[in-house]
Amino acid sequence: MSQATPRIAPLEAPYPPEIQQQFDRIMRGAPPLMLFRVMAGHARAWDKFRAGGLLDPGPLSLRQREIVIDRTCALNRCEYEWGVHVAIFAGPARLTEEDVSATVQGDATSPCWSPAEQALVAAVDALHHRATLDDAEFSALSAHYDEPQILEIMLLCGFYRTVSYLANGLRLPLEDKAARFPQSTPSPRLRGEGWGEGESPRGR
């Protein structure tokens, strides 16, 4: 297969009625993402994947959630999922172009982050690199986030590492409307252009 073709073939339309209903519910009228089309061809994997989603309203703000997701995907060099989330959620989450670039090119000390966000990014980095938090990192996180929020952060890091494995390991082609990793100069695509109102997939 070429790099533009996933290593596991995606479902092609017309989709089985049950799968079409699931796509419609997740995508809200937009065509299904390639990741969903690949996963939906394998019932157990698709069911488990959908059951693990964390995009329902949770203890973190939308901005906090997206910082965790974007940073996790960036650390895993998963441009596919990073780009989907930036295109859909950067605007609603009030992530500036500088914020978005910092999830890829910056770190916890980047000047765009508040003290609470610095602790958040530092925790994401520690979990990615060491799969744990030392006492100082946990204390810094606890100064800004309560127990349900800390658990949510850990769950998000783990789930989006899994998503990164899937997207990278399957060599999913980048979605046309998704953002791209910033180069030396931030690209206008980082402004969240792409899916219009009513077209934003919300299932992941």
Image (cartoon, grey):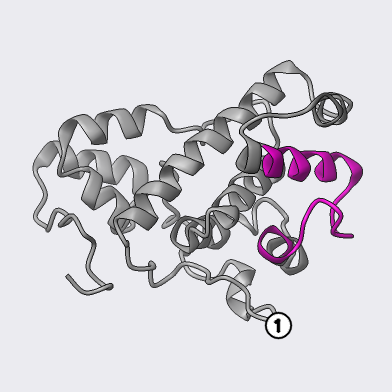
Q: Position of residue 44 (x, y in %)?
A: 20, 29
Residue 27: in magenta span: no
Q: Which residue is at a point 34% across and 33% down the rendered structure image?
A: 50
Regarding mark 1 in the picture, which secondary structure is present there?
Answer: loop
Q: Which residue is mark 1?
A: 185
Residue type at mark 1? Thr
Q: Quadrant of the C terminus?
A: top left
Can residue 87 be seen in the rendering of this structure? yes
Outermost residue toward the front in this view: 130
Which region is colored magenta?
102-126
Q: Which residue is at a point 60% across and 54% down the rendered structure image?
A: 75
Q: Quadrant of the N terminus?
A: bottom left
Q: From the viewer's side, name the closer residue of 62 and 101.
A: 101
Outermost residue toward the bottom in this view: 185
Residue 107: in magenta span: yes
Q: From the viewer's side, name the closer residue of 13 and 172.
A: 172
Q: Which residue is at a point 58% across and 66% down the rendered structure image?
A: 192
Q: Position of residue 2 (x, y in %)?
A: 21, 74
Q: For the residue carrying disc 1, how many other residues have a C-alpha within 10 Å: few (<14), some (14-19), or many (20+)? A: few
Q: How many marks?
A: 1
- The picture quadrant where one finds residue 105 is bottom right
The secondary structure that dominates the magenta segment is helix
Can residue 32 be seen in the rendering of this structure? no
